[in-house]
Amino acid sequence: MSDSSKILQAYAFCQKMAREHYENFPVASRLLPKTLRQPVSVIYAYARTADDFADEGDAIAETRLSQLDDYEKFLLNAAKGHPNQDPIFIALADVIKNDPRLLQPLRNLLIAFRSDVTTKQYETFHQLLKYCSNSANPVGRLILLLSNHATEQNVAYSDSICSALQLINFLQDIDIDYQEKKRLYIPLEDMAEFSVNTSQIAERQNSPQLTALVNQQIDKAHHMLLEGKPLGRNLPGRLGLEIRLTIHGGLQVINALRKRGDVFMQPKLQLSDWLAIASRAIFT
């Protein structure tokens, strides 16, 4: 089989994986420009697989970290033009060949996945944002690089949006994260400020103090999302619309989080919410 045929098959593998495992960021969305759909699918396949090393199955921490170290070696080899036979890395080698700047955000994602293995709580909000800078911000940066819109200002807006969306996701999944993975993404210093302890989370004990604490975290995410909002108008065409939909989707989830009476409940957006998101993205 020729090298070009291998690359085409590798891209097809990644696109199929993206379609089958669609999650919360724009994976090969039809709104994305056609030129972005293929490389974004490759990045998704890479991140999804590495994330599984950190989260899935019952492997011990040492095994998970070893798998992630091997994955980074495969990435570095692909960046040098020497991928292994895994279709993800065959496709990644082709993507990175066109822009070597993509390598660092891809490596940053691995830093976040290692943190998922080793760190269950964060002492300060600054530490939590540092985690977000590796777990979420690289996605936005990669899309800006691929679309040739990675100006300093656009990157700053994107970082605010991506970190905010990560925080919003944490606030949706407080109960799931703790009960299933013993992870808590509310800074310990903020918990102490409101006299909330981990046992209240473990035992699903709602209280005025816990509600006030979660509302504080919502306010932080809301502020960051609004800081990044200009990006939706800085980017042209379909890409700008995709970003505006993402921003207004995040704002709608924030509204739902504020309205829920139980901080352990995961809010679900209704059809009316999606219509409002689409309208705001198009007309505002």
Image (spheres, rainbow, N blue to C red):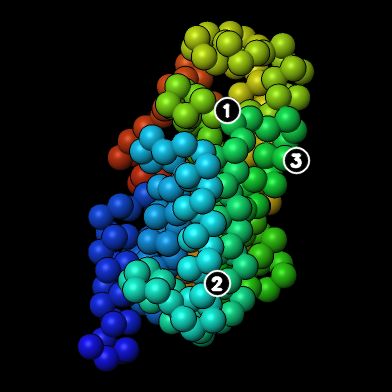
Q: Which mark is residue 87?
A: none
Residue placed at 72% from the left, 40% from the top?
A: 127
Foreground residue among 42 and 264? 42
Where 281 falls versus 14 (above or below)? above
Badge 3 is on which residue? Answer: 126
Q: Residues within 10 Å of mark 1 (few under 14, many from 20)?
A: many
Q: Are marks 2 and 1 in contact (CB under 8 Å)?
A: no
In the rendered structure, which disc, 3 or 2, sits on the residue that comes first in sequence? 2
Residue placed at 51% from the left, 38% from the top?
A: 61
Quick check: 101 left or right of 246? right
- Front of the two marks 3 and 2: 2
Q: Are marks 1 and 3 in contact (CB under 8 Å)?
A: no
Local secondary structure at mark 1: loop
Badge 1 is on which residue? Answer: 184
Q: Which mark is residue 76?
A: 2
Quick check: 158 left or right of 236? right
**Figure quadrant of residue 220:** top right
Quick check: 119 left or right of 206? right
Give the alpha-carbon distance from disc 3 to disc 2, as whole Å.
Answer: 29 Å
x and y percentages locating residue 13 in the rendered image: 27, 68
Where 116 falls versus 34 (above or below)? above
Give the alpha-carbon distance from disc 1 to disc 3, as whole Å.
Answer: 15 Å
Residue placed at 62% from the left, 47% from the top?
A: 132
In the rendered structure, which disc, 2 or 1, sits on the residue that comes first in sequence? 2
x and y percentages locating residue 240 in the rendered image: 50, 66
In the rendered structure, which disc, 1 or 3, sits on the residue that comes first in sequence? 3
Foreground residue among 76 and 204? 76
Residue type marked 1? Leu
Residue type marked 2? Leu
Local secondary structure at mark 3: helix
Local secondary structure at mark 2: helix
Residue placed at 62% from the left, 67% from the top?
A: 104
